[in-house]
Amino acid sequence: MLPDLTTSPAMLAAVAVAAYLLGAVPFGMVMARVFGLGDLRKIGSGNIGATNVLRTGNKLAALLTLVLDAGKGGIAVLAARVWIGEDAAQLAGLMACLGHCYPVFLGFRGGKGVATWLGTLWVLAWPVGLAASLIWLVAARLSRISSIGGLSAAALSPFIAWALGRGSLIGLLVVLAALIFWRHRYNISRILAGTEPRIGEK
């Protein structure tokens, strides 16, 4: 359920801070400024992620936001794994996602965490990341609602890890799934009410 703890508490604390700060970089806001799209917090859902960037109509900015948000999670995990160990890698993934959802640079009001979560999964265990990405794509395609894709993938990810023999990831994936569901609580209410915006709507 959890990786073996082999790293010192002081080193893990340093990893946590560094990964959080990397995750807190609001690439959606950066892309909105680069492309002159305005303040994302005043557009659509007010979210800083790729889905809301897409609502501006700029597909390139949305794609770059998706790649960069995923990349910061993947880079945090990769750096921690290469330089320290697997326990540090999992902690880095968790903290990068927390940084994205609650960025200190934006008054702790950030995104929903799905792209950053997927980026961490691809580096932690690429078969799990691939399966989760496919679930996201299929669910989002069928429903035309991005949040349904993310919620479906997050909910199933611990079972995917178990099925693929990556039991040490299950604890982390349960925690991250809970975080993603919490960050999507208003989306869930809108889904139930039938008012959740669909992909491509401005």
Image (cartoon, rainbow, N blue to C red):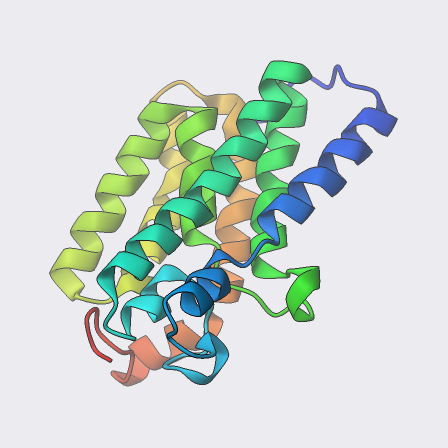
Position of residue 30 relative to residue 174, above or below, is: below
Give percent across and percent down for residue 27: 49, 56
Q: Where residue 175 sits in the image (x, y, percent)?
A: 57, 46
Relative to 141, say whether 158 is above or below: above
In the rendered view of the protein, which quadrant contains the C terminus? bottom left
Q: Viewed as shown, does residue 115 lie left or right of 7?
A: left
Q: Position of residue 16 (x, y in %)?
A: 73, 38
Name the residue: 49% across, 23% down: 167
| Image side of residue 83 versus residue 64, left or right | right
Q: Residue furthest right?
A: 10
Residue in front for this viewpoint, 172 or 57: 57
Quadrant of the snapshot with the N terminus:
top right
- Pick the front one: 77 or 68: 68
Up-down: is 109 above or below 193?
A: above
Which residue shows up at 59% across the image and 44% down it? 96
Q: Nearer the viewer, residue 173 or 121?
A: 121
Question: In this picture, is 6 found above or below 40?
Answer: above
Q: Residue 147, how many percent across, how many down?
A: 33, 64
Q: Residue at x 56, y 65 (%)?
A: 110
The residue shown at (33%, 47%) is: 153
In the displayed structure, does residue 142 sit left or right of residue 20? left
Q: Quadrant of residue 9?
A: top right
- Count of labels in the image: 0
Instruction: From the viewer's perspective, tell me whether residue 125 is left or right of residue 144.
Output: right
Q: Nearer the viewer, residue 80 or 9?
A: 80
